[in-house]
């Protein structure tokens, strides 16, 4: 599933592992640690340590980490605050609700989680923040 076989002999198998083959295995629910454990379990006893080289296991772990590098979240953008004080109030409120996803004080722009957008709108209206 994650090794492209090149040669199979009675006591030897030669294959190569690619970023794409590891990604496919990861998408199918196989973790990097499972891949490494499998390769170590089937490594030749003639290997120096009986394990796959450390650079191979590190690369497999790195490819798994790449998969989780970017995560998306739905949010609602609030901008055009008239004053920094108004922006600060709303940003603090969103932060206290654990709903703040991103903010820029320079741009007076705030992104909050979808789940809290209505509460933030209500807060803005009730405090007469434009």
Image (cartoon, helix red, strand yellow):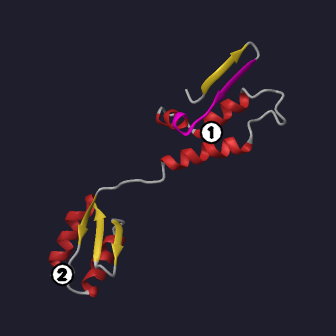
Q: Which residues are magenta?
A: 12-21
What label does residue 83 carry, if any?
A: none
Q: Position of residue 54 (x, y in %)?
A: 73, 44
Q: Which residue is mark 1?
A: 33
Residue positioned 33% across, 65% down in the render: 99
Is 60 or 116 nearer to us in this picture? 60
User: For numbered disc 2, what is the local secondary structure?
Assistant: loop
Is 23 or 37 nearer to us in this picture? 23
Task: Identify the image quadrant of residue 87.
Answer: bottom left
Determine whether 105 is above or below 78 in the image.
below
In this view, the residue farthest toward the front is: 6
Reply yes or no: does residue 116 show up in magenta: no
In this view, the residue farthest toward the top is: 10
What label does residue 129 carry, if any?
A: 2
Residue 81 vs residue 37: left or right? left
Is 20 or 114 nearer to us in this picture? 20
Task: Identify the image quadrant of residue 105.
Answer: bottom left
Task: Identify the image quadrant of residue 19.
Answer: top right
User: For numbered disc 1, what is the local secondary structure?
Assistant: helix
């Amino acid at each position: 599933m994650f090794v492209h076989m090149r040669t199979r002999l009675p006591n030897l198998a030669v294959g190569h592992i690619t970023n794409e083959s590891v990604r496919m295995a990861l998408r199918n629910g196989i973790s990097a640690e499972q891949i490494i454990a499998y390769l170590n379990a089937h490594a030749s006893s003639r290997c120096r340590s009986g394990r796959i080289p450390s650079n191979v296991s590190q690369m497999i772990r790195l490819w798994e980490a790449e998969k989780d590098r970017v995560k998306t979240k739905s949010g609602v953008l609030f901008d055009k605050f008239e004053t920094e004080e108004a922006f600060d109030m709303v940003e603090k409120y969103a932060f206290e609700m654990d709903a703040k996803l991103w903010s820029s004080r320079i741009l007076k722009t705030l992104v909050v989680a979808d789940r809290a957008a209505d509460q933030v709108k209500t807060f803005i209206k009730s405090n007469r923040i434009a």
